Image (cartoon, rainbow, N blue to C red):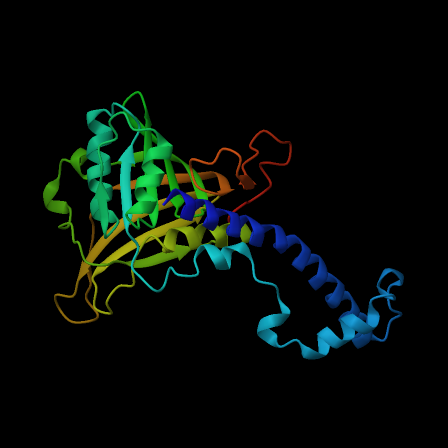
Amino acid sequence: MLRRNTRLRREYLYRKSLEGKERQHYEKKRRLREALEEGKPIPTELRNEELALRREIDLDDKDGAVPKSLIDDEYAGATLREPKILLTTSRNPSAPLTQFVKELKVVFPNSQRMNRGGQVISEIVESCRSHDITDLILVHEHRGKPDGLIVSHLPFGPTAYFGLLNVVTRHDIKDRKAMGKMSEAYPHLILDNFTSKIGERTANIMKHLFPVPKQDSKRILTFANRDDYISFRHHVYEKHGGPKSIDLKEVGPRFELRLYQIKRGTVDQGEAQNEFVLRPYMNTAKKQKSLGA
């Protein structure tokens, strides 16, 4: 198993190293194609390679013209089988954190919760790989309040790091009659305002945590981005008086997420390359919207 994981990781890193070369080659072909279409002189640095690039341009089709990204490799087999998720916490979790993770277990279908105990991250990741777990979710806390959530896709990544804010669990809501019943059906997803490149990447990580729902599923999960804060809401609905009268009830839990890092690797790989890092203390940080408009 260790040799197999080492070989797969080596193959993945090799494909990763080729991506930069393929991107440079694609840029050369794109610049040559633009010069030919607009009737402009061919750039000086491309004249020695002009004949070879022209032959490749003639042979390119729409699918092969754009080089494939690592993202295509990471989620290539995601649609072939349903996600299988492992939920765990930091060491010595408090009662509120344990309660929150129990509710997350119902939010994510096909998930199972594990008591962390004394296990280190590398042991958990290896165990997940050997049991065909597709995603590992770690929840952290500060003084009894959940404050961090890590989503790591296996076997090669990516890993997204989120800050958790304004967590309200079902256990905290006293008016139980106003709440809907917690459904375990596969949910429909609403991903709102993830328009930038990093936003699309984040939405891609989120949506692959959930299997494809049935058409008549009455459960809805919403991830709405406002000013780089992702609001999570969980609803169920009923049609008591026909299609025009819909009774919508919030089920819970509810919380806000703030993305602060995406790494091209699993959570146990400290040397993995950063794809995105939040820089909140730069002078232009207030003007920038990382995830969407």
User: Total of numbered circles in the picture?
Assistant: 0
Please state the horizontal and vertical placement of residue 242, each as a whole percent of the image. 16, 71
- State the residue in front, 180 or 140: 140
The answer to whether any part of residue 69 appears in the image is: yes
Please state the horizontal and vertical placement of residue 260, each as a whole percent of the image. 48, 37
Extreme-left residue of the structure: 177
Q: Residue at x 22, y 37 (%)?
A: 114
Quadrant location of residue 139?
top left
- State the residue in front, 173 or 278: 278
Left or right of 185? Residue 34 is right
- State the residue in front, 128 or 8: 8
Q: In which quadrant will I find the N terminus? A: top left
Q: Residue at x 26, y 36 (%)?
A: 168
Q: Residue at x 46, y 50 (%)?
A: 8
The answer to whether any part of residue 255 appears in the image is: no
Instruction: Look at the picture and state if 149 lies above or below 61.
Output: above
Please state the horizontal and vertical placement of residue 152, each as a whole percent of the image. 39, 43
Extreme-top residue of the structure: 143
Extreme-bottom residue of the structure: 58
Instruction: Look at the picture and state if 92 lies above or below 4.
Output: above
Instruction: Look at the picture and state if 292 lies above or below 63.
Output: above
Extreme-front residue of the structure: 3
- State the residue in front, 105 or 123: 123
Please state the horizontal and vertical placement of residue 150, each as a whole percent of the image. 38, 38
Left or right of 74? Residue 137 is left
